Each structure stands twice: as structure tokens, then as C-alpha cells.
Image: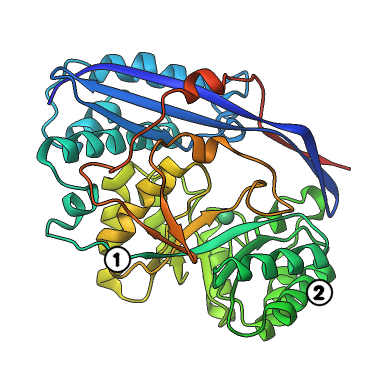
Amino acid sequence: MRVSEVSVYSLSCPIEPKQVRPFYGGFRRLHKRDFILAVVETADGAVGYAPSGASSSVMREYFEDASHDSFADLLETRIADAIIGEEIDAPGDITTTIQNLDLPTKLESEAISVFDVAYHDLWGKRVGEPVYELLADRDVQPEPLDMYASAGMYMDPEGYAEQASVIAVRGFDAYKYRPAGPPEEDIETVRRIRERVGDEMEIMIDAHTWWKLGERSYDFQQVERLFNEIEAYDPYWIEEPVQPADYDAYERLAAATDVPLAGGESEESPSGLKRLSETGVDYVQGDVRHHCGFTGCWELIEACADDGSITFVPHNFGTHLGLVANAHLITASPESPLLEYPLFGSDVAGMYPFPLAEDVLLTDLDIADGQLRLPDRPGLGVEVDESVIEDYTHVDGPWTEFVYE
Ligand SMILES: [Mg+2]
């Protein structure tokens, strides 16, 4: 297979009016959601697609203008130049070519992800197999995938409880939310959610706020106290309770609590995920959009399956193209039981709108009662609607900002 053309589109979906969401010690502004769509063509006219997970807030570290547009440029110029014309017989060829460019680790993982996913889409189409069969290396009868509803951003306790009950009515049996502190309110929130939804619904707490509160970020003892209090409400997991890459803190928490731990979305590379998986966490959350694509995540899924004590549950918070890509991982891996399904403003009150999430696909996904049934078609198995390239033009600047008081 020889790549002949690479087009990378940096798209934006404005949030109008802009939203301001208060948290303990400040507020968060939400301007828009960004999305990068990569279109990779081969010399024989086949087309593969990939989403990029790179967000402007992450890219600020590498580019002066804090825009994901800069990353799209990098993909379309320096990286595409290195790949175009190369004979690519396996995803490893792409990995090596990109590694030879000596990019910072995070950029390298993100860039490999884009081309690895597009490669799998192209290769699946070429050989007539869905990506999940390429990964599993056997015939797979796709089963409906259980998804947990991911929403709940910086509300008062009653807001979360109300949202959880609406989501339960829609057929989901698991709900994840992002608390906004202070600690006593974090406890009150999980208490109210549990009271409202009963014992049947699983509750996941995405605690990234606990270390993103500026001067009010919780210290280790505070996090430990919260774990002790929250345990009574039987959370399915607590996610990112401490700073990413603070493996020592993850180890200490894992030793100190029986509450299941999850993390991984912020890791810079598959080796970071591997390191995290050795701390005693129960769930490791790789993402094909961040962690060297299918190749990087599949290695980790196999390692988790061998280990038996850690479960791979992909991080997934973006468009339906990313959802489908991560769903292929889960379909190929019987040990991975769950997929993250973000609900946006058109689906559930209390979230911001993100219509591009669904508009990017022409294919109507079969989603019902909290389950996704993947199409049984070659490659990623879905058709991308390229009219989003015209409809969601790029808007400069970061998509979100944390403002500390
Ligand atoms: Mg998270």
C-alpha cells in the first residue's frame, strides 16, 4: 500500500452561547469543541479516515498559538511528507517512519495514532474485513457493546442526580460524572445520585477536577479521605484521582483503598499506560486517538488479558468516528466489557451541545438501550460525511479555559 495524499482538516463546533461552569476555586469557560479529521488516500484510490484526539489545551505545550490547527498542520506537512510515497505493508512501518522524525513523545503518540487508525481503515477495506477481525486475527461475531453514559460536568449535587436519573430512563445502567468540589459537596453529590438511581446503576466518578483546582487542588490526604467516605456509595471506579504520571500516588492509593481505580487518558504514550497499569489500578483507559492507535492499544489489551487483574476500558470523549474506532478495540477483545459514550447537550440537559459528534458520520449508528452494535463492514465500517469540512470551519483559540479566582 502506498499513500498518495494526506488531507487533515481542523474543525470547530462553537458552543453558543459560550458556557461558564463554576468549580471550587474558579470557573471553566467553554468556547467550542475542536475536532481533527484526517483523510488518507492510497495510489489505487482507496480512502481511509481517522479522528485525532489532540485538543488545543494539550497542544499549548508544543505550539505558540494554543491551537489544534497547528497540530493539523504538522500532520499535513512534516508527517505526511515522510509517509507519502512510502510502501506500507504493516502499521509498524508507519510507526517507524514517524519515530524517525524525533517528535516530543506526546506529539509522536498522537501522530502515530492518526495514521495507524487510517491505515487500519484502509487495510480492512482492502482485504474486506472489519478492523476488529484484523485485530483479533480470527472471525468475530460482533455482539452489542455495553456503553456507560459519560456526562455530568460541574453542576450542583441535585443537577447530577437529576441527570443520572434521566440517563437511567434512557436505558444506560452506568453513569459517569465530573465533580467540581468542594470535598463535602463531592460526597453529597454521590450520596444524592445513589439515592436517586438506586443500587442497580453503576456510578463512575471522573475526579480530574481534584488536581485541576489550582491552589485548591486536593492533597493526597484529602483524596484518601474522600475515598473513605465515597466507598459507602459503591462507585464502579474513581478515575484520575491524582495527577497523571504520579505513579507513586496511584500506588499508595491502590494499597490504601478497595475502591477501584481508573486512569490513563492523560498518559503520553503506550509505555506511560503500561507504567500506570503496574501501579495497582483496576482499569486502564487507553484511547486509539491518543496512544499509538490500534497497534499501541492492542498491545496493552493483550498485556491486560495476560495479567488478568487489570481491565482495559477505552477512554472515549469526542465524535462518533472516535467512538466507532474505540468500539473496534472492544469488539475484538472479550475481556474489555465497556465503552465510554459521551452524551452532549442535544441528548441530555446539563451538557454542552456538540452536533459535529454525530454529523461526522453519514452512517446511522445502531445505538439502543445503552448498547452499540457495530456495522459488520470492512475497515471502520462507517461512512464519513465530508460535508462537515465545510460546515464546521476552524475557529482560532483554545476550546476551554480554566480560570482560577
Ligand atoms: Mg476522564
Quarter of the figure with residue 364 = top left
Q: Quadrant of the C terminus?
A: top right
Residue matched to label 2: 188
220 lies above or below 387: below
Residue matched to label 1: 143
Residue situated in front as seen by the camera: 175 or 26: 175
Quarter of the figure with residue 185 = bottom right
Where residue 123 sits in the image (x, y, percent)?
17, 37
Question: Furthest-right residue in view?
Answer: 405
Q: Secondary structure at mark 2?
A: helix
Image point (61%, 19%), residue name: 64
**Could you classify mark 1 by the number of other residues whose Cα lies within 10 Å: few (under 14), some (14-19), or many (20 or more)?**
few
- The amino acid marked with disc number 2 is Glu
Image point (61%, 39%), residue name: 354
38 lies above or below 162: above
Quarter of the figure with residue 76 = top left
Q: Quadrant of the N terminus?
A: top left
Give the Cα separation between the discs numbered 2 and 1.
37 Å
Which numbered dot is residue 265?
none
- The amino acid marked with disc number 1 is Glu
Q: Secondary structure at mark 1?
A: loop
Residue situated in front as seen by the camera: 9 or 112: 9
Where residue 47 sits in the image (x, y, percent)?
25, 26
- Quadrant location of ligand 1? bottom right
Label 2–label 1 contact, CB within 8 A:
no
Image point (35%, 65%), residue name: 144
Image point (47%, 38%), residue name: 53
